[in-house]
Amino acid sequence: MSVIDELKNIRARDIPYSRVLSSMCTYPHHVAIEAHNLFLGTNLGDPGIFTGTRELEEKLISILGKILHYENAEGYICSGGTEANIQAIRAARNILKGRNVVIPESAHFSFEKIGDILGVEVRRARLDRDYRVDIDNVESLVDDETVAITGIAGTTELGQIDPIDDLSKLAVEKNIPLHVDAAFGGLILPFMNRRIPFDFELDGVASITIDPHKMGMATIPAGGIFFRDKKFIEALEIETPYLTSERQYTLTGTRPGTGVASAYAVLKHLGAEGMKKITEGCLEKTSILVEELSQIGLETVIEPIINVVCFRCRNADRIKEELYRRRWVISTIRKPEAIRLVVMPHVDDEVVSNFTSELKKVIKIV
């Protein structure tokens, strides 16, 4: 057996996305794959060599900046939401020299790493009855040592959107940077009919995390961190005397250009109308799932805002385990007990039909 045949056999053991309703990633768009292959071997960690790739990154930053209501945004394409969140808080800490950050209880687990790596206290604000961060509690946790407050635009568990506009007002009042983790929602909310402010159009927003390898259908890895003010980028810089650039502000040194190329290709190929069509398709399938599962008595934890939906369900973990045994992948949440589904572009009518049929069988057994 050749090594390629061996690899094909190993890859075949992975569960295909067509059986996955738990992940916020999906099959890359076909133009993303083609663009990715053109940029294999590129390294944005040494931009003086890969000058064309660096120019492409600048174009992509401009496109994403416009989507986020600020075409002059500063930033770069990184490995994903975790790195982006680390860099946002690291920059704020380096500028304000404080010792704590205030986040919602619903924030991504990457903030656990942030506390550990950066040595800042992570203060968690409670949620309201709709699972959005409680503004009054956020304000009570802020003090003279707070370097940033954080809001989530598309929480990992429920897809809920924090009141970013109110957080923005608080950030302006307290003169503290507001970081918005829109790793998932950042390429959904701009293309929805329902308008939910979350980005740089709000004065208090200082930085935004956005992941093109999620709803942007770029190849992995392709995350992004964006800042309103260049001073945040400058706060991250270190000297790199032996490279073609004198200074570097990224977290990782080696940085593939494939994520840049694939993200750029998708956004240019689809345009705003194409992205809107993809988004609307995912929201439509989400509504179908709600309708189908309500017929067997499952209620949603919250009415879905984006393409994430959770259904209150006893024995949720047992249901997840039985589905996994049948090679269907979902996830669960604990407060409240519920099954969680993410409806990505690979979840088409056939996937919805097959999954709901299987879920109904499993619920009867469990």
Image (spheres, rainbow, N blue to C red):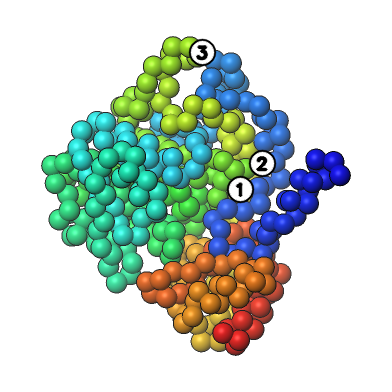
The answer to which of 192 and 180 lies nearer the viewer is: 180
Tell me, yes or no, if residue 66 can be seen here. no
- N-terminal-most mark, 2 or 1: 2
Identify the disc placed on residue 135: none
Asked if the residue at tag 3 contacts the one at tag 1, i.e. Cβ–Cβ closer than 8 Å, the answer is no
The answer to which of 317 and 207 lies nearer the viewer is: 317
Asked if the residue at tag 1 contacts the one at tag 2, i.e. Cβ–Cβ closer than 8 Å, the answer is yes
- Residue matched to label 1: 217
Instruction: Report the Cα–Cα distance between label 2 and label 3.
Output: 28 Å
Element class at badge 1: loop
On the picture, is 351 further left or further right than 364?
right
| Direction left: furthest residue | 144
Q: In which quarter of the image is residue 146?
A: top left
Q: In which quarter of the image is residue 173?
A: top left
Identify the disc placed on residue 244: 3
Q: Which amino acid does label 2 sit on?
A: Ala
Identify the disc placed on residue 32: 2
Please provide percent x and percent y for residue 347: 64, 63
Instruction: Report the Cα–Cα distance between label 2 and label 1.
Output: 7 Å
Please provide percent x and percent y for residue 365: 61, 86
